[in-house]
């Protein structure tokens, strides 16, 4: 099911096409916040997965459902230049297939061994685990949970 | 009071078969969507005095309305068409070449059945197991030899759910370790988007004019796909994918289960049909693999021959299995897109094979039963 969206970010208009490759499922409700009061600086997360504090801005705006949702805070998201991945030293793990990131198993800064599962990519309704090609430290995670990626898109930088 | 013990042994065996089908569906997850209703129907119909298969019994009504008329497989095809995304195939249309040899299992089982003394109508119905496609098998069999429906249907679905058990050893036997490790370029070719809309109509017209008796099959499949790709009737496409397909699956499954009465199922010929079906699956998979090996030689090592086994229908299991075999030995080998493309190609090819058998079966002396 393809849907077209027009998104204006920082004065630039992007026309994006979103293809939903998984059957629609109800978005999980955000977990109730039970800590001390805080000031919301970003749109409430739609997924209960914990996100690393230094998570980069979504590299591909069309990729993130949360970013596509018509929230007024959308302007806060700055588009990052596409060179982000290349600018970082280390080995970039690229998407071997088009698909949706259904689970990210590591956090930035994590030590991983060769063969450890980094993330799970759902493609053609099949879940594929992406393993670390070698041992190292997860330097950057360039995608978010539920992001849809194209073949060759950078996913994770290992160092 | 002998009527209290009217439980013929054969009925107990058939209830056992029903329980077995339910067991493998629930605990082994083999094609549960079909084997649960089929198994339950088989249990129901074999309870003495249930009368479910007598005129007026609800399983008989479902059979008369949906299977004797061939309506249910057609409705399933509308739903299936709405689920299939052909874009991976459009990006690499050459993978269709595997679909033709992969259908040779049909021919093998058909000829072998004739040799074993089945009449042509029965031989075609047994051969169609090699199409590895449930609705096609049901449609063709109910046209030619309805009495074989329970055996053919249960056989086709059982082997389809067991496809990894056949595909993995055959692939490893025929394709060498070095060939299995071949990585294929991911180079999707671009195609005009209008293709997606034109394709279902074009296929229907071409196949329909070559094999007119197969129009209900290919036409309903492509109608469902057109609902999906036209882009203007999302509501209808969604209903076809979900409600229509699900409701029809329930009714079709339980009605097929209702045909599993002891005196039709517990025969030597059922065992023969299962054996012939196995031949059909093995020949189909092997021919696909061998043709891919050949293509690999011709292209000087650009094609991973594991793809050959995905030219069968058995969608999406065959495609996934090929991908998993390749990844098992090399985590970085990603065959999935190619395998799925070949697998949807196989889906089309099996329907075309069914259409051809419906249209040209008479040349073998097979007359439609109805």
Image (cartoon, coloured by chain):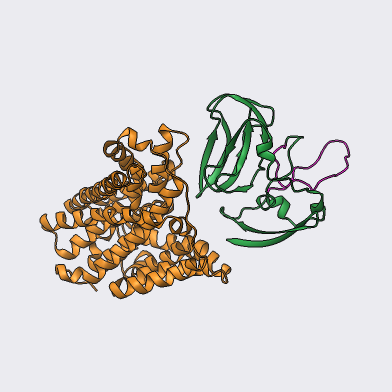
Chain colours: A green, B orange
Front position in the image: B125 or B69: B125
Inspect this view and state whether residue B232 appears: yes
- B339 or B125, nearer to the observer: B339
Q: Nearer the viewer, residue B255 or A5?
A: A5
Q: Quadrant of residue A3?
A: bottom right
Q: Which residue corresponds to the image point at 57% horizontal and 49% vertical from the top-left?
A: A150
**Dominant secondary structure, magenta:** loop
| Count of all numbered marks drawn on residues in the image | 0
Percent position (x, y) of residue B182?
Answer: 38, 38
Q: Which residue sits at x=85%, y=44%?
A: A40
- What is the span of residues highlighted in magenta in the rendered image? A28-51
- The residue closer to the viewer here, B331 or B212, is B331
Residue B312 drawn at (x, y percent): 33, 53
* Magenta stretch: includes residue A147: no
* Image side of residue B276 versus residue B309, left or right: left
| Apparent side of residue A146 relative to residue B64 in the rendered image (left or right) | right
Q: Is residue B233 above or below residue B261?
A: below
Residue at image location 10% in from the left, 56% down from the top: B115
Residue B336 location, x and y as percent? 45, 46
Determine which quarter of the picture holds residue B209.
bottom left
């Amino acid at each position: 099911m393809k849907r077209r969206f027009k998104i204006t970010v920082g004065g630039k208009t992007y026309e994006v096409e979103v293809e939903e490759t998984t059957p629609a499922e109800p978005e999980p409700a955000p977990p109730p916040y039970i800590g001390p009061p805080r000031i919301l600086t970003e749109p409430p997360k739609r997924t209960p997965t914990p996100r690393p504090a230094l998570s980069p801005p979504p590299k591909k705006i069309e990729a993130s459902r949360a970013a596509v949702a018509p929230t007024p805070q959308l302007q806060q998201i700055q588009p990052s230049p596409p060179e982000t991945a290349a600018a970082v030293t280390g080995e970039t793990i690229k998407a071997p297939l088009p698909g949706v990131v259904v689970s990210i198993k590591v956090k930035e800064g994590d030590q991983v061994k060769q063969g450890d599962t980094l993330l799970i990519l759902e493609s053609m309704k099949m879940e594929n685990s992406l393993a670390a090609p070698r041992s190292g430290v997860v330097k950057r995670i360039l995608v978010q949970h539920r992001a849809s990626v194209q073949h060759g898109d950078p996913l994770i930088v290992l160092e | 009071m002998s009527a209290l013990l009217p439980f013929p042994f054969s009925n107990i065996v058939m209830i056992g078969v029903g329980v077995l089908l339910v067991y493998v569906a629930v605990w082994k997850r083999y094609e549960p969507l079909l084997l649960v209703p089929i198994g339950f129907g088989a249990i129901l119909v074999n309870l003495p005095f249930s009368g479910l298969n007598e005129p007026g019994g609800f399983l008989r009504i479902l059979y008369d309305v949906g299977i004797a008329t061939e309506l249910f497989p057609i409705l399933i095809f509308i739903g299936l068409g709405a689920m299939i995304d052909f874009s991976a195939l459009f990006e690499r249309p050459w993978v269709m070449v595997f679909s033709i040899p992969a259908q040779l299992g049909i021919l093998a089982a058909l000829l072998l059945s004739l040799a074993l003394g089945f009449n042509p109508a029965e031989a075609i119905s047994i051969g169609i197991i090699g199409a590895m496609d449930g609705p096609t098998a049901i449609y063709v069999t109910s046209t030619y030899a309805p009495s074989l429906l329970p055996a053919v249907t249960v056989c086709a679905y059982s082997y389809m759910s067991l496809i990894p058990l056949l595909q993995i050893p055959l692939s490893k036997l025929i394709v060498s370790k070095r060939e299995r490790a071949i990585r294929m370029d991911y180079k999707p070719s671009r195609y005009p988007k209008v293709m997606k809309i034109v394709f279902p109509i074009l296929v229907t017209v071409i196949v329909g004019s070559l094999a007119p008796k197969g129009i209900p099959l290919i036409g309903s499949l492509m109608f469902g796909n057109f609902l999906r790709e036209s882009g203007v009737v999302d509501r209808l496409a969604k209903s076809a994918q979900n409600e229509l397909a699900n409701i029809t699956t329930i009714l079709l499954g339980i009605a097929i289960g209702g045909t599993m009465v002891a005196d039709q199922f517990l025969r030597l010929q059922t065992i023969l049909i299962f054996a012939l079906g196995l031949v059909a699956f093995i020949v189909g998979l092997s021919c696909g693999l061998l043709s891919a090996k050949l293509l690999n030689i011709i292209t000087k090592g650009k094609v991973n021959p594991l793809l050959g086994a995905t030219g069968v229908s058995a969608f999406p299991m065959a495609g996934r299995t090929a991908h998993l075999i390749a990844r098992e030995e090399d985590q970085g080998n990603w065959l999935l897109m190619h395998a799925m493309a070949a697998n949807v190609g196989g889906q089309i090819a099996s329907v075309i094979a069914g259409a051809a058998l419906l249209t040209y079966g008479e040349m073998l002396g097979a007359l439609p039963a109805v």
